[in-house]
Image (cartoon, rainbow, N blue to C red):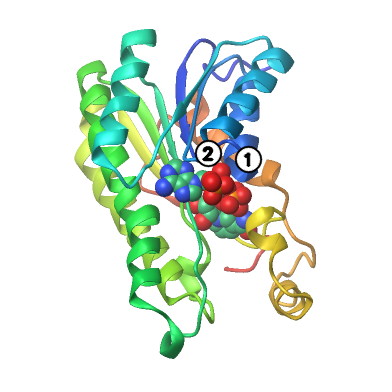
Amino acid sequence: MMDLGLQDKIALITGSARGLGRAIAEKLAAEKAKIVITDINDALAAATAEEISKKYRIETLALKHDVASEESTKEVIKTIVNKFTRIDTLVNNAGITRDARLMMMKQTDWDLVLRINLTGAFICSKLVSKQMLKQNSGSIVNIASVSGLMGNIGQANYSASKAGLIGLTKTTAREMAERGVNVNAVAPGFIQSDMTHVLSVEATDKLLAQVPMNRPGKPEDVADVVLFLVSDLAKYVTGQVINVDGGMVM
Ligand code: NAP
């Protein structure tokens, strides 16, 4: 098996109790990284961390975390650094949707989505980057969305947050490039998860009609690309957005 350079690396994946975050955690765990599962749902985070630890025989840590809170994020980082002394990988994965057409969208739903999806990634990146700059090494991956590239009806808040995340990725990449830290984004298309299971049959059919590969993606498809970006194979890759979308955006 190819050595991707992840053995014993410390990987923090936000919102990873389930969904894409969990798939990413499992992919990195299979490469023997030590995994920190953080999530607003601490009971599920603890259960997921325990399952992953047993399955891959690696050390895991589960922490309650609200990415939108600077206080909560500081606490999470303090706990990780106290335990493991470093943070090698940050995946800003936590994200939510609150869909409605623009005319009907409540400002509270606009604010909440921007706060968690974009400001949350800003807070985590800012605080973790201090640790990575001390180490002169690290990788950050932001989980954006094709909605941030092409827009999507009913998702003004979500697509604005994901477009913002792409801007954040490129600026952070430029600022940290000289210090051995690479920063990239992955833009998933239509991926099977709890977030998309709630969509109506009509909405699902409309989305699938835009996918040249004519099928939804799996969380593992996204996790494979994240694995590449945080591995030694992508050391010279920074500031990029990689779409994982069956050809939706090309
Ligand atoms: P998901 O199944 O809804 O999982 C998201 C996780 O984040 C949940 O465990 C959720 O906890 C947690 N979370 C919510 N708010 C949080 C907060 N403030 N702090 C920390 N954790 C929080 O979503 P997913 O489909 O796996 O999506 C993961 C990421 O991929 C998101 O950024 C999403 O925008 C992006 N994405 C997904 C798709 C797709 O098709 N699924 C496509 C493009 C991009 P609760 O369960 O308590 O809410």
Q: Nearer the viewer, residue 130 or 214?
A: 130
Mark 2 or mark 1, whichever is nearer to me: 2
Which residue is tagged 1? Answer: 18
Q: CA distance from mark 2 to mark 1?
A: 10 Å
Give the amino acid at mark 1: Arg
* Residue at (79, 63) in percent of width and height: 215
Q: Are marks 2 and 1 in contact (CB under 8 Å)?
A: yes
* Residue at (32, 57) in percent of width and height: 115
- Whether ligand 1 has any atom under 8 Å from the Cβ at mark 2 is answered as yes
Is 168 on the left or on the right of 187, as rendered?
Answer: left
* Image x and y of residue 112, in percent: 37, 62
* Image x and y of residue 51, in percent: 69, 21
Which residue is tagged 2? Answer: 41
* Residue at (49, 36) in percent of width and height: 229
Res. 34 visible in picture: yes
- Whether ligand 1 has any atom under 8 Å from the Cβ at mark 1 is answered as yes
Crowding near the residue tagged with mark 2, few <14, some 14–19, many ≥20 C-alpha atoms within 10 Å: some
Q: Earlier in the sequence, mark 2 or mark 1?
A: 1
Is 245 above or below relative to 174?
Answer: below
Q: Furthest-bottom residue in view?
A: 103
Give the amino acid at mark 2: Asn
* Residue at (56, 11) in percent of width and height: 59
* Image x and y of residue 93, in percent: 48, 44
Residue 157 sits in quarter: bottom left
